[in-house]
Amino acid sequence: LIVVAIIGILAAIAIPQFSAYQKRSCAASVRSDVRNLNTTIKAALTDDANATVMATGAVATWENNYTSGTVNQPAGKIAAARVSPGVKLVVADGTANTFTITGTHMKLTSGSYILTGGGSVTDTLSSAF
């Protein structure tokens, strides 16, 4: 009976910790994928200095939906970017300094990671856990 009680106490401690670990992992995936896409965009712009990332007002979406097994990504120079399972990246507008990349994760009910071409970052992923 004492052994069962000890196992119950350990489980009560471990399960919330594991849940928090999963959420931190999801947030890290989003941050990494946004930075990788930023690097891909900067490389494409370096190859062609007159290029724009997206037409003004246009949006491109990368999404790796592990529940349905589908991966959506746009065509073109920046299509080579890959996303982790559950991550959705949206690129909007612009030139090298005006585009924005917004990253979210299916398992996080709130929060996003936004990176602009100019380098500014807005990170609200930590509020999701």
Image: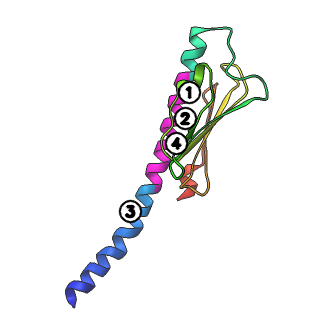
Q: CA distance from mark 2 to mark 1?
A: 6 Å
Q: Earlier in the sequence, mark 3 or mark 1?
A: 3
Q: Residue at x 52, y 53 (%)?
A: 67
Q: CA distance from mark 1 to mark 4?
A: 12 Å
For the residue labelled by badge 3, is the local secondary structure a helix, a strand or a loop? Answer: helix
Label 4's element?
helix
The residue wearing badge 3 is: 18
The kind of secondary structure element at disc 1 is helix
How many numbered marks does the figure carry? 4
Residue at the image point whose x is 38% and y is 62% from the top: 18
Q: Is residue 91 above or below residue 27?
A: above
**Label number found at residue 38:** 1
Residue bounds of the magenta highlight? 23-40
Q: Quadrant of residue 9?
A: bottom left
Kind of residue sitting beneath label 3: Phe
Q: CA distance from mark 3 to mark 1?
A: 30 Å
Q: Nearer the viewer, residue 63 or 36?
A: 63
Counting residues from the start of the chain, the first of labels 3 and 2 encountered is 3
Provide the secondary structure element on which disc 2 rests.
helix
- Residue 83 drawn above or below residue 11: above
- Residue 61: x and y in percent read 64, 36
